[in-house]
Image (tube, rainbow, N blue to C red):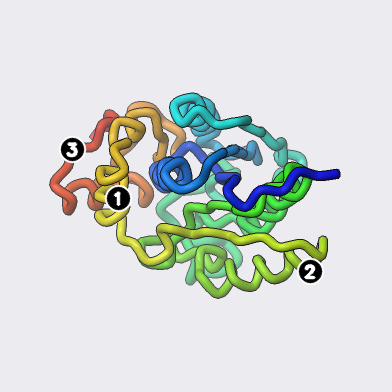
Amino acid sequence: MRPTNRDWALVCLSGGQDSATCLAWAKDRFTKVYSVSFYYGQRHAIELECSRKLSELAQCEHHFEIQMDQLFSQIEVSSLLDKSKDVTSSFDLDANLPSSFVPFRNLFFISSAASIAYLYGIKNIVVGVSQTDFSGYPDCRNNFIKSLNATLELAVDSSFEIHAPLMYLSKKETVLLMKNLGCLDWYRYTHTCYKGERPACGICPACKLRLKGFAEAGIKDLIEYRK
């Protein structure tokens, strides 16, 4: 019989600033925390190293890594999957979206996380999506998360709660939340740059948004930048 505990959580951990904040948030609220990361052929796969380090710092019960590169290699329309594409340009299939958009990424990620949560009796899934300071991704909106939550429950006739603590926070507010949680130093081990560079490029949309948040919070970013 599967164990069930409503005080356990599984964090979708990309290794970036937002998911690191969610990991600290979960550690502050739940008695046992697990983490899961995904390799999907992303050009910034260095973030997986960050996920392992953050899981270690948070003393996660277990850190899962799911390989999805074969699936996403079939849909290389995103600049996060195709290094020949400019990360500052528009999406090939929809000019209203940034080129970094990966269709159905959060759908696959959260559904896979739910599979693990179901098997381990975990009732809480924590994700770092935000519709306040986001890059225009439709799958970062609250209506998508609510809809997916209902779908996952119907799929296995069991209850889940998807938590998105950053949904209405700006990057500045995210930095300040991490400060209040006493885990600012964790940001030293995160990766945000879309180009997968270290030091970070400082000019891609993700780097600019991160730097803006730290500047507005009046706190120095702990990672290095080329520019």
Mark 1 / mark 2, whichever is N-terminal: 2
Mark 2 / mark 3, whichever is N-terminal: 2
Is disc 3 in contact with disc 1, using a CB cutoff of under 8 Å?
Answer: no
Q: Amino acid at mark 1?
A: Leu
Q: Amino acid at mark 2?
A: Leu
Q: Please determine whether, in this image, residue 142 is positioned above or below residue 186.
A: below
Q: Which residue is painted at 34% across and 62% down in the image?
A: 169
Q: Please determine whether, in this image, residue 216 is positioned above or below residue 220.
A: below
Q: Which residue is mark 1?
A: 177
Q: Which residue is painted at 60% across and 53% down in the image?
A: 124
Count residues near mark 3 (Cα–Cα under 10 Å), then give few for <14, some for 14-19, many for 20+.
Answer: few
Compare residues 82 and 65 and report the one nearer the observer. 65
Mark 3 / mark 1, whichever is N-terminal: 1
* Image location of residue 204, percent across then percent down: 36, 46
Q: Which residue is mark 3?
A: 220
Q: Please determine whether, in this image, residue 116 is positioned above or below residue 44.
A: below
Count residues near mark 2 (Cα–Cα under 10 Å), then give few for <14, some for 14-19, many for 20+.
Answer: few
Q: Which residue is painted at 59% across and 71% down in the image?
A: 146
Q: Amino acid at mark 3?
A: Lys
Q: Secondary structure at mark 2?
A: helix
Q: CA distance from mark 2 to mark 3?
A: 44 Å
Q: Which residue is mark 2?
A: 154
Q: Which residue is painted at 57% across and 61% down in the image?
A: 92
